[in-house]
Each structure stands twice: as C-alpha cells, then as structure tokens.
Amino acid sequence: PGPDWYESRHTPPNSSLMVWKVRGTGWHTLVWTGSRPGRIAEALGIGPDGPYEWAEEWRPRYPDQDLHDWTQEGRIRTGLFPKASHQERTQQIDTESRAREDALVDALASRGGLTHDQAIARLAQGGEKYRQLLDSGQAAISRALHTTRRALPQGLGRTAVRWALDDLMERHLLPENAERLAAGQLDIEAEADRNPDVSARSRRAVAEYTAPTTDPAAADIDGFRP
C-alpha cells in the first residue's frame, strides 16, 4: 500500500527509506519513492558520520516472481545501511543456516516422537538421501499451498496462505491438513501424466516428512536401506 498522503489516482510510490538516529525519536520514514530508496541512502552517506546512523530500504513484497506471479503481498525490507561487511554477512548466513537446521531437527523430533539428540542422529545416519526425501515431502506440500493460494482472490486469505508457505519453508511448520493438501496436489500432478514412480516417491516423502516412521530401516526409507 502507498502512503496515506498520496492523493493521486495513479499508482503511488511504493518504496520507502526508514532512518534512525541514536538521539532521535527512533525509526521514522524519511521518504517514499518509486525507485530504489537504497540509492538515496547511499547518497546521504548513512552511517556514524552521516545524518542518520542507520537506514532500512522497504519495498513491495512479490514473493512468487519465479512463478511469474506479481501479486503484491505486504512489504519487505530489502536493504540495510550502512551495508554489512563481508565478515558480518558471513556470520549472518551462518546464523540463518543454523536456525534452519535447528528448525528441521525440532520438527523431526516433535513429529517423530524423538528426542533432540535422536533427531540429530537420525539425520546423520540417513545422510543426504534422507534429507533429499524430506525436501521432496516439504516441496509437495509447498506446491499444494501454492495451488491453494493462486486460486484465492487477492486479500487476507491469500496472504494467510503465503505466511503458511513461509512457515513451512523457513521453519518446517506444517499447515493444517498438510497430508490431505499434498495428496490432492499429487493427484492433480498424476492426472497430468506425471511419472507414477515419481508420484509414489513423493507420497512416501510427504508421509515421512509429516509423520516420521518409527523404524526407517524396516520401512525401507531412503538413506536407511542396507
């Protein structure tokens, strides 16, 4: 959504630059613009020696550009100034990677009735093949949510499904009726002449991702086969 003060009937500027001063009143919007606000931040010299210590670039959120879906769903921070150093960025990437791994371990433990250490051991024992199976199950549920989301009109319901997708992909949190949604999606894909073997593997992957089996070796789960 554009700024309230914009009265034109045409498209209002949809990107903004938020700034912060240590001795100021906290974060506030400095400017709305139709171009990249990061350029304004760079021109101002945001940093300890500039007019503002920190700045954030905020732009429209188009979460599914790779699907050629340009529906705006909220706004997202796309830049932080002054820019992080290589070391800071590396630390941030490492932190995010650990958070994703911790989320996977927690999900495996809670859904499989395992302790934290048992979930870690299971991932280690199953190796890359087991992780690929879990990824496949997650992807099938993701495709089902995308199908549901695209069928909805733009609004709160559609955005809610978008948040469910984020929870699934970033934190391994299952949406309601995850197995039923995935089964419906795989049925659609099977009707589109998808390879039956691929569909069967996807169904096994969904089952393992949503409700990890007690004995993966006995169940002939990928990564545990002799």
Image (cartoon, rainbow, N blue to C red):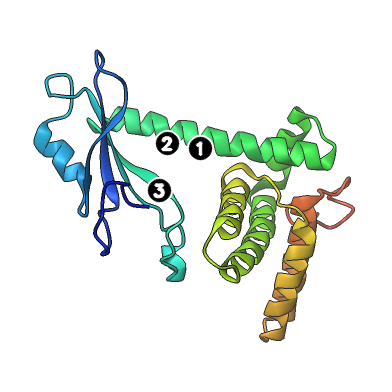
Instruction: State the residue position of label 3.
Output: 75
* Image quadrant assignment for residue 200: bottom right
What's the residue at 15%, 41% (across, down)? 40
Instruction: Work out whether residue 224 can be spotted.
Output: no
Quadrant of the rendering where the C terminus is positioned: bottom right
Instruction: State the residue position of label 2.
Output: 93
Label 2–label 1 contact, CB within 8 A: yes
* Image quadrant assignment for residue 141: bottom right
* Residue type at numbered disc 2: Ile
Q: Residues within 10 Å of mark 2 (few under 14, many from 20)?
A: few
In terms of depth relative to the viewer, which is nearer, 225 or 162?
162
What's the residue at 66%, 65% (across, down)? 144
Q: Residues within 10 Å of mark 1 (few under 14, many from 20)?
A: few
Instruction: Indicate which label's residue lies in the foreground, 2 or 3.
Output: 3
* Above or below: residue 27 compared with residue 125: above
* Residue type at numbered disc 3: Arg
Q: Which mark is residue 135?
A: none
Instruction: State the residue position of label 1.
Output: 97
In terms of depth relative to the viewer, which is nearer, 35 or 9?
9
Where residue 1 sits: x, y (%)?
A: 38, 52
Instruction: Work out whether residue 87 can be spotted.
Output: yes
What's the residue at 85%, 49% (across, down)? 213
Q: Is residue 51 shown left or right of residue 114?
A: left
Distance (Cα) linking label 2 and label 3: 22 Å
View extreme (left): residue: 43
* Residue type at numbered disc 1: Ser
